[in-house]
Image (cartoon, rainbow, N blue to C red):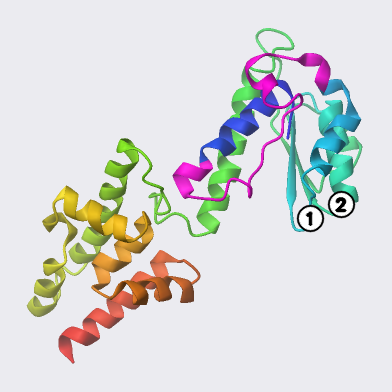
Amino acid sequence: MGAGTSGRLGVLDLSDLPPSYNVDEMRYIALTAGGDASLRTARPAVEDVRAAGAADLSSLLPHPEDVLIGISASGRTPYVLGALHSARAHGLLTVGIVCTRPSALLLEGQCDFVLEALVGPEVISGSTRLKAGTATKMILNMISTAVQVKLGNTFGNLMVELHPSNAKFVARARTIVRSIAGARAEAYSGAHPALILHLHHSYPDALADDELDGVIARCGGSVKLAVVVIASGWAMELCVDALERRGGSLRHVLEDVRYETVVRVFM
């Protein structure tokens, strides 16, 4: 939640989460002073009203399990401070991002955590869209990415919850499936010949693009599920159940697949 550049950066960061990680748009909400109209046209005066920040937050019916991140390079934006006060009243965990010290954001004591990016004076005095904006974007990127990693929406450096919604993402989905399922076969390079032969029968590089696209489509566009289907050879229902039992952790499911494969080949 922020105003001006800070608000726009919050919107920018969260807007990419649904296509990249297939998350519910209502789970991550970015609010900026003045609403969507202020994203394209600057409306500086709207950030001066504390009550507006509190009202915008309250309109979302916040729950104590929610988290509010208030972004203010100067640390004194009334819109953000008002929202943080309201958040504390609703029992939310509150985080502040600020680029100066001392700051009202810290001194008012409404944040459980304050992240201070002390970038120093801007080359154009007061133009916080410069160094402060860059630092803020990096912090937001780190927070949102770390959350997705903790939720199991990545595998290594791959976005396994990617939603293949355009040509670029369709191609990326193929690459991810081939990378993970293919690496599984290569990991057994020194294994018993019977096991290697078994693995290479399901090696994803053997699938043409349209065949791989078909598998992903049958999995409802789920890259993670497609990896399990190809790597395991199990029925779709078993793959879905395996992911559910493992809390959506692809890494843990592939460990199960590895164990089951060894047992099946040699028993």
Looking at the picture, tell me which residue is in the foreground, 238 or 196: 238
Report which residue position mark 1 lands on: 63
Amino acid type at image mark 1: His
Looking at the picture, tell me which residue is in the foreground, 176 or 97: 176
Q: Which quadrant of the view contains residue 57?
A: top right
In 3D space, how far apart are the residues under numbered discs 2 and 1 (Cα atoms)?
A: 7 Å
User: In the image, which residues are magenta?
Assistant: 17-46
Q: Residue at x 38, y 42 (%)?
A: 165
Secondary structure at badge 2 equals loop
Q: Which of the image's four quarters has the C terminus? A: bottom left
Left or right of 1: which side holds 8?
Answer: left
- The reply to whether callout 2 and callout 1 are in contact (CB within 8 Å) is yes
Q: Is residue 30 one of those drawn in magenta?
A: yes
Secondary structure at badge 1 equals loop
Tell me if residue 30 comes above or below residue 260 in the rendering: above
Magenta stretch: dominant secondary structure: loop
Tell me if residue 8 comes above or below residue 202 in the rendering: above
Numbered label attached to residue 90: 2
